[in-house]
Amino acid sequence: MRANRIIANLHVADVDAAKTFYTEYLGLCTEEFNMGWVARYTSPETGANIQLVTRDATSSEDSVVSVLTDDVDSAYAEAQQMGFEIVCPLTTEAWGVRRFDAGPRRDYVRDSAPIALRLKLPAGRRTPDAGRRTAHLLTGDPNTFNRPLIVRVDGDEKARSEQLDGREFTWHRIPLDGGPSGGEVDLELSAREDETWHLSACVVVADDLGPVSK
């Protein structure tokens, strides 16, 4: 594909509250557009610009950059052919822009559908904590904000993270119990409807034995 212009997208909590730094201090005083959830500010002298984004209005993920091209259909086909992750399919938005969201595959799990991890817990020692384990789940995103991760064990909700800003991470500690003779538990990961969940790492520790897997 041919990129004609690349614009950085900066996540902010509120566009109007954040724009003063960029318009008055950095001199990006021309407001090209402002849709409430996204606005672009440009320097009339140099052409330097930035887009402030609170939350994408239609995509399940917020993009890090916006890339403008003359042929978005060909760019979409090329992204698919090269195996890049398509976060949002090619769409003509209500405001007239034809776009899609894609990027390189990352080293964490991300999905919109729930997934269940069936964990086999070995038997424990003959102690009061026999068979007890703790699953440590890391969620977050190095680039964009991260929507809540919901964790259930055998159907019962055990944890729900808060929304995190980019480069913020948090651990969930989920107690598991396989009993003195061991057993299986279903660890389900999900998100709210039409949103995606992220899992950056998972470590399971035996409370009476030390680390057993990761």
Image: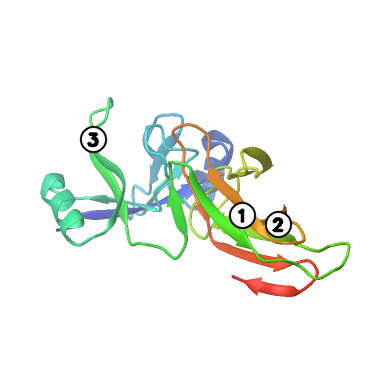
| Farthest residue, direction right | 128
Q: For the point 76% across and 67% down, which residue is it?
A: 124
Q: Which residue corresponds to mark 1?
A: 184
Choose between 30 and 4: the one closer to the eye: 4
Left or right of 95? Residue 16 is right
Q: Which residue corresponds to mark 2?
A: 178
Q: Position of residue 134 (x, y in %)?
A: 72, 60
Left or right of 29? Residue 169 is right
The image quadrant that residue 148 belongs to is top right
Query: Of the residues shown, which amino acid type is indicated by label 1?
Result: Glu
From mark 3 to mark 2, how far is it between C-alphas? 47 Å
Q: For the point 28% across and 27% down, which residue is it?
A: 95
Choose between 154 and 27: the one closer to the eye: 154
Q: For the point 23% across and 35% down, which residue is it?
A: 91
Relative to 146, is 96 above or below? above
The crowd level at tag 2 (other Cα within 10 Å; few <14, some 14-19, many 20+) is some
Tag 1, which secondary structure? strand
Query: Of the residues shown, which amino acid type is indicated by label 3?
Result: Thr
Question: Mark 1 or mark 3: which comes first in sequence?
Answer: 3
Q: For the point 88% across and 62% down, which residue is it?
A: 128
Q: Quadrant of the C terminus?
A: bottom right
Query: Of the residues shown, which amino acid type is indicated by label 2?
Result: Gly
From mark 1 to mark 2, how far is it between C-alphas? 6 Å
